Amino acid sequence: MNSPPRPPTTINSRGHPPEFEEIIQEKSHNFVGREFVFTAINNFLHRHNQGYFTIIGAPGSGKSAILTKYVTDNPQVIYYNAELEGKNRADEFLVNICTQLINQHSLNYASLPDNTTDGSWFFSSLLQQISDELEPDQKLIIAIDGLNCIDRNSQPPGTNLFYLPRYLPDGVYFLLTRRPFLLEKSGLLIETPSQSLDLADYPEQNHQDIQAYIQNYLTPLTPLPYEGRGEQDYSPPLVGEGLEERSNLKSCLSNYQISEQEFCDRLTTLSENNFMYLSQVISAITENFYPEPFWYNQLPPGLEAYYQQHLHKMIPPEQGMKYSIDVLNVLIQQQKAISVDAITQIIDTDEYEVEEVLENWLEFLQQQ
């Protein structure tokens, strides 16, 4: 049954739907570093006439922040977030993304065709129309965050995730983010230039960016110049979230006689290059959640809820998976890497059973 005609949804002056604008602002807040990723993206865009560029990273590694920062710096980029509730279905994606394309490029459609969501035909048609009108130095870039969240049951088996095109016309690019996955389960068949960047392959750059992120909270905000006056005439910084966080953090370190360098080094080690952990712990410290810095006998509520979501995905309460709890207990008790064979011997089961569990947990594990 075909869907009824839908008029284009309202978008704001910047070109992003309101539900995404809030995410863009939130995820790009206090952003620092990641220049190696932006360099790789720009090199790909200049090297190829069209294509897919995918950022791969574990939960909390900063994928979403990187994408929203890129969109913030390049507001002409079309943005979609599959992690938001209700946005992980193919039909919702097609309606939303086609509406954005029509509005941003002033295409002559008063409403979407009845069968817009019947595969990629209309989506691909819009991409071709826009490609035909692009100037030689223009690019159409579509950024999609959270491919791992897509509901594959919302479209026929064997089709590309979100019906993403197998081929792309000139000047059309997709920037994607997703968690680690098995290649044979990518959900994408692409015959156009493509490149993946796995954040785990850049430990030194990640380490430097983590430290820069922490240092950003230890650096006083630069006063803003009065509007319309000389550069030497400065106004005091407005009292806001950033100023208060910095002030509280520096006061806390001073009270417990912890140097900024010690704080930075210890928190860098504890974070294990995880920006979600880092941001939540720093907020908890500035809000006096802990009796003193590094007194981490419990998780901040936001971080606890975040990890609880991961646990529910690993072991769904309504079904679970045989041997999952046993495997998880072994991993928790280990202080170093452990082989599948060793886990098999500890829980006394077949190697196949352990491999099946670990394969479903790939996005949460570090392989050596």
Image (spheres, rainbow, N blue to C red):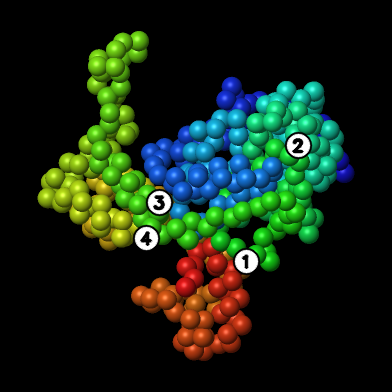
Where does label 2 land, which residue?
127
Q: Earlier in the sequence, mark 2 or mark 4?
A: 2
N-terminal of the pair, mark 3 or mark 2, is: 2
Q: CA distance from mark 3 to mark 2?
A: 35 Å
Q: Which residue is mark 4?
A: 272
Q: Amino acid at mark 3?
A: Phe
Q: Which mark is residue 182?
A: 1
Compare marks 3 and 1 and give the one earlier in the sequence.
Answer: 1
Mark 2 to mark 4 CA distance (whole Å): 40 Å
136 vs 277, left or right, is right
The image position of residue 125, as x and y in percent, is 81, 37
162 lies left or right of 19: right
SS label for mark 4 = loop
Say what amino acid the circle numbered 2 marks. Leu
The local crowd at label 4, few if under 14, some if 14 to 19, many if 20 or more residues have their Cα within 10 Å, is some
Which residue lies under the disc numbered 3? Answer: 275
